[in-house]
């Protein structure tokens, strides 16, 4: 029987720890430990997106999780959507604490493909559907942004049940714009940790063509696919759960011959 | 012919507008209009709960919403409040009786007119008694220092299931609550406001009691529902504090039938 694993779940832009409620419930019911922080300005964070000072400030709650790990403790790190960017940063910083990094319909960057290059392509499609706050005044670059309601409803929560659409729409917050999210990816750091990409084949937010680009330019160890919309943790929670358990079994040494598929 | 209503949903202490997500989706599917509001410092509202000192501050999002509603009998709303939202129900019914066609109190807390919760001695005693599971679970924050009264209360994650969701099979709501609940401002509980027969008392209302409630216990619900009406009906349901989330279809059927009974067919699809 597999032993208890520690999963660390990282939400995407505008979302918060709340989006993992089904995944966390399933993993905990299966006997695992789950850390799902609100990144700064997300979920019920007391900080306003316009007051996020830096990418490190944004990630601090995630760094705190890694700083609190035991000496020999390693985790299964999971990032959704833009959450792939913090995931890449902590993979580089804490590579020895991570069994495997899982990208769910996420931005899986590499040195040759930084966010500054990806952003214009992926978000070109959303430029007319986004609104911005200019916390530093007119004529400066925006400090936060969000997708307009109708587009958010359709693209973030495509394939979701009406109640999950309702939940998500009530909890989305502006996302901070940070200019310093570039990470240097080293062989000993980022590239020493195996990566798995889980595609959402009906994704209207991060379209499959962009997910494929990430995969092609920065080959992970494994690619899986779920036929559902962007928020797999909401619209395909049980299927995602099975994938996460299988990935844990495959990448945690001495995990045991059996894992629970509950 | 089914009638369509505009429901305004008010969450309980520590929770937020998000709490109503499954109810809101169902009401919308049934053709109703729904507004669910965060009180100040609750849900994703940016205020800091420990800084909130009055009911006016806490209820501000709801007060502003009712101010903005047109003075039009066709646009009256059905006001639904849970648990600590009882205070908001009374305040809104008193100030905006002409904008509310019907009110539903769900296991709701309310002290006497002109009497703060802290001074409503019998109610306060029941709520803080050793018999109430809530008493053993609750924790406090002291923004003004420990020598002064606490400024907020909250329930640690480990207590959420027993206090709020003991009748639920799934852990989903417990996990959501662990990620979204925030401390509840307490300073306002030492303040009072008046509500009168002429205004509050003119809005038809009902009280729904939950018989297995670990949060606001049956004796407390009995006290409020028997003293602080008038209620057209007091409905007893066997369930816990969030039974309306456990049995949402039944809850909505009940809401619709009560609305129809006490408002009549004035609103049509």
Image (cartoon, rainbow, N blue to C red):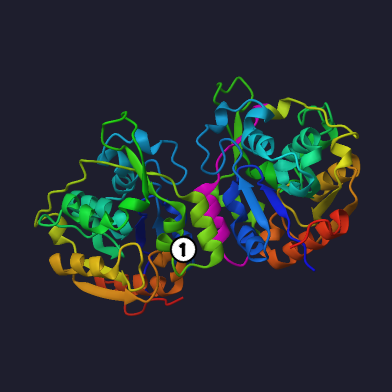
Camera-nearest residue between B2 and B153: B2
Q: Is residue A32 left or right of residue A70?
A: right
Quadrant where the N terminus of chain A is found in the figure: bottom left
**Residue A216 at what x, y percent from top left?**
15, 69
Chain of residue at mark 1 = A
Q: Is residue B48 left or right of residue B103?
A: left
Kindly identify the residue that appears in the image at 71 percent across and 41 percent down: B84
- The vertical placement of A100 against A49, above or below, is below
- The vertical placement of A84 against A175, above or below, is below
Q: Residue furthest bottom?
A: A257
Kindly identify the residue that appears in the image at 46 percent across and 63 percent down: A28
The tally of labels here is 1
Q: Classify 10 Å Cα crowding around label 1: few (below 14), some (14-19), many (20 and above).
A: some
**Residue A199 at what x, y percent from top left?**
30, 71
Q: Is residue B2 left or right of residue A222?
A: right
The range drawn in magenta is B167-187
Query: Which residue was labeled with disc 1?
Result: A28
Query: Would you say residue A72 is visible in this rendering?
Result: no
Badge 1 marks a residue whose secondary structure is helix
- The vertical placement of B133 against B91, above or below, is below
**Residue A127 at what x, y percent from top left?**
31, 51
Kindly identify the residue that appears in the image at 36 percent across and 72 percent down: A202
**Residue A3 at what x, y percent from top left?**
37, 68
Magenta stretch holds residue B264:
no
Kindly identify the residue that appears in the image at 42 percent across and 77 percent down: A261
- The vertical placement of A187 against B113, above or below, is below
Query: Would you say residue A83 is visible in this rendering?
Result: yes
Camera-nearest residue between B232 and B172: B232
- Residue B173 figure quarter: bottom right
């Amino acid at each position: 029987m597999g032993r208890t694993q520690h999963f660390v779940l990282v939400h995407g832009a505008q979302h918060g720890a709340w989006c993992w409620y089904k995944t966390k419930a399933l993993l905990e019911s299966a006997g695992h430990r789950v850390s799902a922080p609100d990144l700064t300005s997300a979920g019920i964070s007391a900080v306003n997106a316009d007051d996020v000072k830096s990418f490190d400030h944004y990630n601090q709650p995630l760094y705190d999780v890694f700083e609190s790990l035991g000496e020999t403790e390693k985790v299964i790190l999971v990032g959704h959507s833009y959450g792939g960017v913090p995931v890449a940063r902590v993979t580089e910083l804490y590579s020895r604490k991570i069994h495997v990094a899982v990208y769910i319909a996420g931005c899986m960057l590499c040195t040759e493909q930084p966010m500054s290059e990806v952003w214009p392509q992926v978000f070109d499609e959303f430029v007319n559907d986004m609104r911005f706050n200019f916390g530093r005044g007119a004529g400066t670059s925006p400090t936060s942004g969000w997708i307009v309601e109708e587009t958010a409803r359709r693209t973030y929560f495509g394939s979701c049940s009406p109640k999950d659409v309702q939940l998500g729409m009530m909890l989305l917050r502006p996302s901070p714009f940070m200019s310093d999210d570039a990470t240097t990816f080293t062989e000993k750091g980022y590239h020493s940790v195996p990566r798995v990409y889980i595609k959402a084949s009906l994704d209207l937010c991060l379209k499959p063509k962009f997910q494929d680009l990430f995969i092609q330019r920065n080959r992970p160890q494994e690619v899986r696919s779920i036929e559902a919309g962007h928020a797999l943790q909401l619209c395909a929670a049980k299927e995602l759960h099975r994938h996460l358990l299988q990935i844990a079994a495959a990448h945690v040494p001495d995990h045991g011959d059996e894992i629970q598929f509950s | 012919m089914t009638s369509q209503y505009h429901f305004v949903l008010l969450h309980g202490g520590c929770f937020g507008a998000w709490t109503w997500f499954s109810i809101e989706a169902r009401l919308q599917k049934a053709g109703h209009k729904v507004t669910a509001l965060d009180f100040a410092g609750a849900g994703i509202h940016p205020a800091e709960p420990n800084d909130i000192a009055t009911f006016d501050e806490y209820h501000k999002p709801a007060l502003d919403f009712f101010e903005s509603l047109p003075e039009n009998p066709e646009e009256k709303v059905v006001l639904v409040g849970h648990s600590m939202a009882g205070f908001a129900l009374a305040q809104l019914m008193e100030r905006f009786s002409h904008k509310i066609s019907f009110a539903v109190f769900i296991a709701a807390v309310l002290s006497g007119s002109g009497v703060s919760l802290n001074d409503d001695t019998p109610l306060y005693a029941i709520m803080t008694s050793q018999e109430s599971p809530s008493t053993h679970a609750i924790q406090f924050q002291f923004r003004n220092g420990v020598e002064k009264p606490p400024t907020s209360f909250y329930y640690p994650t480990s207590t959420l299931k027993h206090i709020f969701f003991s009748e639920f099979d799934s852990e989903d709501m417990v996990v959501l609550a662990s990620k979204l609940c925030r401390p509840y401002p307490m300073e306002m509980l030492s303040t009072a406001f008046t509500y009168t027969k002429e205004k509050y008392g003119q809005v038809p209302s009902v009280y729904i009691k939950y018989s297995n409630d670990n949060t606001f216990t049956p004796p407390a619900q009995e006290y409020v529902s028997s003293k602080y009406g008038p209620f057209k009906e007091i409905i007893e349901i066997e369930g816990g504090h969030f039974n309306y989330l456990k049995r949402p279809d039944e809850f909505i059927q009940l809401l619709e039938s009560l609305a129809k009974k006490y408002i009549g067919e004035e609103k049509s699809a």
